[in-house]
């Protein structure tokens, strides 16, 4: 082999080595980019998990008293019935006044804990908050409006604990013109 052929072979080997090195660098850069992408995705997933866990914990704390409130609502109902019965009976004014005070106190305690009565009469029927037990014609309320409540409903924060049992208007009664 001549010197010229030898130097040409060496130059071609150097070109091949440089090309192989460039390919290896490109491959390593691609692997690095892929590893960085996976690390970012994993970090984002972890952050989403943390936020979801915090939200679930906050909801759990916020609604921890739901069983207690559900158990107290029949007591409120019975106090309301006692007030109605005492109002209809003769001579029980002091008993009526005492029951009204207990009922008002219980209502205030519920409100302090963000347990509030659901609006009923005169409001549009909302299946998320009201449970229709009957429909009735009404001159006073348009169709689809609550005309009266059979049992109060309650919400704790924004969650319905018990829907209100209501009567819903079908609109004005049909008139027979003979």
Image (cartoon, helix red, strand yellow):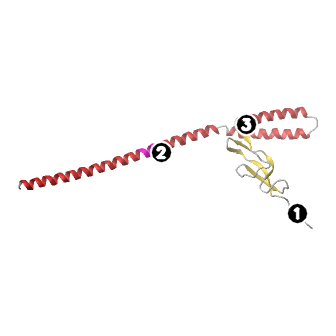
As for residue 40 lying within the magenta part, the answer is yes
Q: Nearer the viewer, mark 1 or mark 2?
A: 1
**What residue did someone put label 2 on?**
45
Q: Residue at x 78, y 33 (%)?
A: 105
When asked about the image quadrant of residue 158, the answer is top right
Provide the residue span drawn in magenta: 39-43
Residue 111, disc: 3
Q: Nearer the viewer, mark 1 or mark 3?
A: 1
* The one of 1 and 3 positioned closer to us in this rendering: 3
The image shows residue 155 at horizontal and vertical percentages of 71, 43
> Looking at the picture, does residue 167 appear above or below residue 159?
below
Pointer 1 and pointer 2: residues touching (CB < 8 Å)?
no
Secondary element at image label 3: helix
Pointer 2 and pointer 3: residues touching (CB < 8 Å)?
no
* The one of 50 and 81 positioned closer to us in this rendering: 50
Q: Residue at x 77, y 47 (%)?
A: 120
Give the main secondary structure, helix, strand or loop, of the magenta stretch: helix
Structural crowding at the residue carrying mark 1, measured as other residues with C-alpha within 10 Å and reported as few (<14), some (14–19) or many (≥20):
few
Structural crowding at the residue carrying mark 3, measured as other residues with C-alpha within 10 Å and reported as few (<14), some (14–19) or many (≥20):
some
The image shows residue 65 at horizontal and vertical percentages of 67, 37
The image shows residue 152 at horizontal and vertical percentages of 77, 44
Structural crowding at the residue carrying mark 2, measured as other residues with C-alpha within 10 Å and reported as few (<14), some (14–19) or many (≥20):
few
The image shows residue 150 at horizontal and vertical percentages of 81, 48
Q: Residue at x 84, y 53 (%)?
A: 140
- Horizontal arrangement in the rendering, residue 124 relative to residue 43 (left or right): right
């Amino acid at each position: 082999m001549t010197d010229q052929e030898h130097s040409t072979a060496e130059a071609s080997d150097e070109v091949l080595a440089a090309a192989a090195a460039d390919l290896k660098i490109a491959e390593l850069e691609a692997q690095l980019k892929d590893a960085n992408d996976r690390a970012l995705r994993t970090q984002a997933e972890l952050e989403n998990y943390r936020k979801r866990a915090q939200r679930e914990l906050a909801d759990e704390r916020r609604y921890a008293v739901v069983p207690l409130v559900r158990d107290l609502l029949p007591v409120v109902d019975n106090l309301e019935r006692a007030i109605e019965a005492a109002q209809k009976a003769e001579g029980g004014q002091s008993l009526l006044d005492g029951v009204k005070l207990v009922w008002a106190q219980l209502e205030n305690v519920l409100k302090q804990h963000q347990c509030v009565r659901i609006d009923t009469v005169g409001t549009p029927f909302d299946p998320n908050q009201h449970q229709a037990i009957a429909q009735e014609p009404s001159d006073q309320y348009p169709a689809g409006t609550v005309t009266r409540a059979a049992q109060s409903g309650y919400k704790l924060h924004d969650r319905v604990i018990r829907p209100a049992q209501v009567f819903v208007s079908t609109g004005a009664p049909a008139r027979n013109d003979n």
